[in-house]
Image (cartoon, helix red, strand yellow):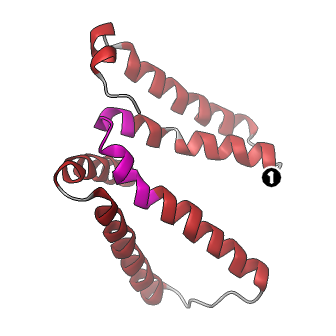
């Protein structure tokens, strides 16, 4: 629950800051600080090791560039042009879409619990949109 509340707080904060400052710089700073804090936590709590082979380095490179570099750095840029509610909804879909893509491409098993959790995420997104009037939908900026 704490992680969800902190993530929601970061989306709201990024919404406000991206309208005042350069969103690309904000995204780069966000990734930099998270990296610094994660490195510090890993040095305190475990014995880190460098990857052993080329496959491991390749996976880390793809994760760093695609997921972190594009995802978290460009999120403030995109969020500048959309509302905080829509950004929150997109972020809420991340776990469900990751589970479905893992099942399709990596042949991971969701099981009944995973399907239930994906259903709950999708239901929460749908329920959050039920109270939105047609006028509010028309006034929302396009993504």
| Magenta region, residue range | 72-87
Residue at 45% in and 43% down = 91
In terms of image quadrants, where is residue 136? top left
107 vs 97, left or right, is right
Residue at 38% in and 46% down = 78
Q: Residue furthest right?
A: 107
Report the front residue among 90 and 103.
90
Q: Is residue 135 above or below residue 108?
A: above
Residue at 38% in and 39% down = 87
Question: Is 73 in the magenta?
Answer: yes
Please identify the dominant SS of the magenta region: helix
Q: Is residue 127 above or below residue 80?
A: above
| Coordinates of residue 141 in the picture (x, y in percent) | 32, 28
Q: Is residue 128 above or below residue 61?
A: above
Is residue 1 among what the camera can see? no
Q: Is residue 68 above or below residue 126?
A: below
Report the front residue among 133 and 37.
133
Question: Is 71 in the magenta?
Answer: no
Total marks shown come to: 1
| Coordinates of residue 12 in the picture (x, y in percent) | 25, 46
For disc 1, the marked residue is 106
Is residue 143 among what the camera can see? yes
| Coordinates of residue 88 in the picture (x, y in percent) | 38, 39
- Image quadrant where one finds the C terminus: top left
Q: Residues within 10 Å of mark 1 (few under 14, many from 20)?
A: few
| Coordinates of residue 133 in the picture (x, y in percent) | 30, 10
């Amino acid at each position: 629950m704490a992680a969800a509340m902190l993530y929601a707080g970061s989306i709201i904060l990024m919404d406000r800051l991206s309208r005042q400052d350069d969103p690309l710089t904000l995204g780069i700073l966000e990734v930099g600080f998270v990296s610094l804090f994660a490195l510090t936590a890993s040095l305190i709590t475990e014995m880190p090791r460098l990857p052993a082979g080329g496959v491991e380095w390749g996976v880390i490179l793809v994760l760093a560039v695609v997921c972190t570099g594009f995802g978290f750095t460009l999120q403030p840029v995109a969020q500048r042009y959309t509302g905080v509610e829509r950004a929150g909804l997109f972020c809420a879909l991340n776990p469900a879409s990751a589970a479905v893509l893992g099942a399709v491409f990596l042949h991971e098993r969701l099981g009944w619990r995973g399907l239930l959790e994906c259903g709950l995420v999708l239901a929460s997104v749908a329920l959050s949109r039920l109270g939105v009037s047609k006028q509010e939908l028309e006034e929302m900026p396009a993504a």
